[in-house]
Amino acid sequence: MANTKSAKKATRVSARRTEINKNRVSRMRTFVRKVEEAIASGNQAEAQAALKAAQPELMRGAQKGVLHKNTASRKVSRLAARVKAIKV
């Protein structure tokens, strides 16, 4: 357990930030899952709409430090390629 006042505060801050980051990660994964489901259903219009909603969410995660910028870009790129590959 933390002994100093600053260490106790750091523990509180860390717990608070962890909770916020968990929510951010969960939100990103939900948006990505919606794209995955739309791709699986084979509906390109629905998948395109889901991707359009997921992209800013992933980039926001990168901006907030939950994901690395390149990781977010890679995920968006791969999802976009899969959406594009759906046969109309």
Image (tube, helix red, strand yellow):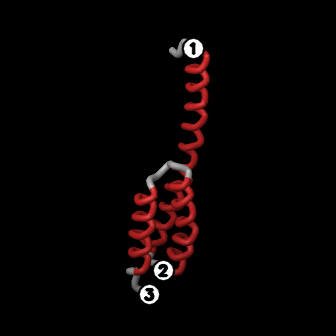
Q: Looking at this view, is 38 or 48 the one in front? A: 48
Q: Amino acid at mark 2?
A: Gln
Comes first in the chain, label 2 or label 1: 1
Height in image: 13 above or below 78? Answer: above
Q: Amino acid at mark 3?
A: Val
Q: What residue is disc 2 on?
A: 44
The circle drawn on residue 69 is none
Q: Amino acid at mark 1?
A: Thr
Between tags 1 and 3, which lies in front? 1
C-alpha gap between disc 3 and disc 2? 7 Å
Q: Which element type, helix, strand or loop, lies under badge 1? A: loop
Say few, some or many: other residues with alpha carbon within 10 Å of mark 3 (under 14 / 14 to 19 / 20 or more).
few
Residue found at the far bottom of this picture: 88
C-alpha gap between disc 2 and disc 1? 57 Å
C-alpha gap between disc 1 and disc 3? 63 Å
Q: What residue do we see at 38% from left, 80% from top?
A: 85
Q: What residue is disc 3 on?
A: 88
Q: What residue do we see at 61% from left, 16% from top?
A: 5
Say few, some or many: other residues with alpha carbon within 10 Å of mark 1 (under 14 / 14 to 19 / 20 or more).
few
